[in-house]
Image (tube, rainbow, N blue to C red):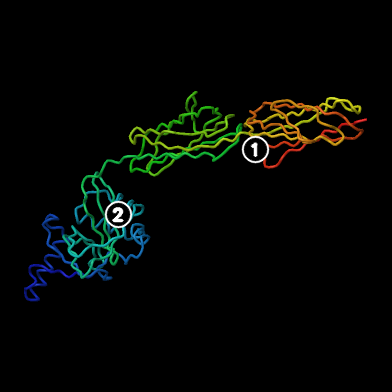
Amino acid sequence: MDWFLGTRFGNLPPVKRSVAILVIFFAALLGLGQPGQAEEHRATRLGHPATRFAPTMHTVEDLRDRFRDEKLWPDFGVVLAQWGWTGDLQDLRRAGLTADVIDGKIPVGTRMPFMSSRKNGAAICLRNVIWAGEAPVEAYAFNFSSKGRLYRCVIPKPCSNFFLEDLGPAPIPMPALALQCNAPDRQFTGRQIKVSLTLKNSGDGAEARTSIALPIPPGATFVSASDGGEATLERVTWEITGLATNSTREVSAVFTTERAGRMDFKPVAIGTQAGQATCECYTKVLGVYAVLVEVIDIEDPVEVGKPVNYVITVTNQGNQTGTGIRVICTVPDSQEYVSGSGSTPVEANGRTITMSPLPSLEGKQVATWRVQTRAIRPDDSRFKVEFTTDQFEKPIRREESTRLF
């Protein structure tokens, strides 16, 4: 960059003024005096190829390239040594390659403790620099810690002439825990439910030891756990050691249940430094509803004029409760209705026999109805049954053949 040095000698004749400026300039190069006592420099233009520290930057990746450049990197050390910086140079480089970068501007009138520049191609340190341009200059900045101090590195884009600001003692690195729970949205009873827990340290310090506890929901049966998880009657627990900053660990547990309904998972993670983190997830457990509908005649064949007895049986073979159970029978025209009974009252209207709806039928339970008719003429007859329930979109139909003679 071009440096225009305005000092208290600005009103001297040109020759004397030049001598005074050179004295100040070389005093800065030699590091004479304390930083706070150095002669003031005024920067009014940035980016001149002869004095810029490195090429103009346009992107954050350009900034990263400055710290990757093995030829340029030693010049960072030269400038900071002239300034008298006592931090660790590798801390600066590491941050330059990885730290979050802020895109901002240096306001007019900003006083910088020092700024890198070049003289005949060599890296130099100019102290006590004031930005005296006509407008704010665009710059990148990032923070880093070194030897217990917190610094901000600021690099104007036009010239890459960097400087550091001492922000004071660095805060003590502390971990910050976050816990995430994932489980299937829904699953059937009797099937495995895998619950995954992700522990993340988003702080700036490592967490030495973290305990994760996952209470076992009521009605659930523990099957297995990953990563050395141990189960008791009440919970599954894991011990996580050495969780570095910005790192994650995932553990999981598998359960089954025969109970339909919502199964809630509420894990808790407790770190030795970071404290507690919680989260929740759940799975909707669906019962398996499977029904068997049977109709049989007690005697076959049946002589005309004799009674014909039918038994209708509905068995809930699953473990989900069936609701709204309705049974309708149709008597063949070669028979006539006599009577009916069973799990609900039976009514007849002509050849249509209707069983009053059964509100519910629990898993593994059976509902039974008996219907008696009379054979009125010879026939290869068909006694028909139609079964519907809230759980089925389509009816189930059955027929029983009875020979009448």
Query: In the picture provided, is 326 more to the left or to the right than 133?
Result: right
On the image, the x and y values in percent for residue 137 come to 25, 66
Q: Tag 1's secondary structure?
A: loop
| Res 131 → quadrant | bottom left
Q: Tag 2's secondary structure?
A: strand
Is the residue under label 1 in contact with that under label 2 (CB below 8 Å)?
A: no
On the image, the x and y values in percent for residue 253 come to 52, 33
Q: Which is in the foreground here, disc 2 or disc 1? A: 1
- Residue at 57%, 29% (x, y): give it: 259
Q: Nearer the viewer, residue 370 or 279?
A: 370
Q: Nearer the viewer, residue 178 or 103?
A: 178
Amino acid type for the residue under numbered disc 1: Gln
| Res 78 → quadrant | bottom left
Name the residue beneath numbered marker 1.
391
Residue found at the far top of this picture: 233
On the image, the x and y values in percent for residue 60 come to 36, 60
- Number of on-image labels: 2
On the image, the x and y values in percent for residue 180 come to 44, 40
Mark drawn on residue 26: none
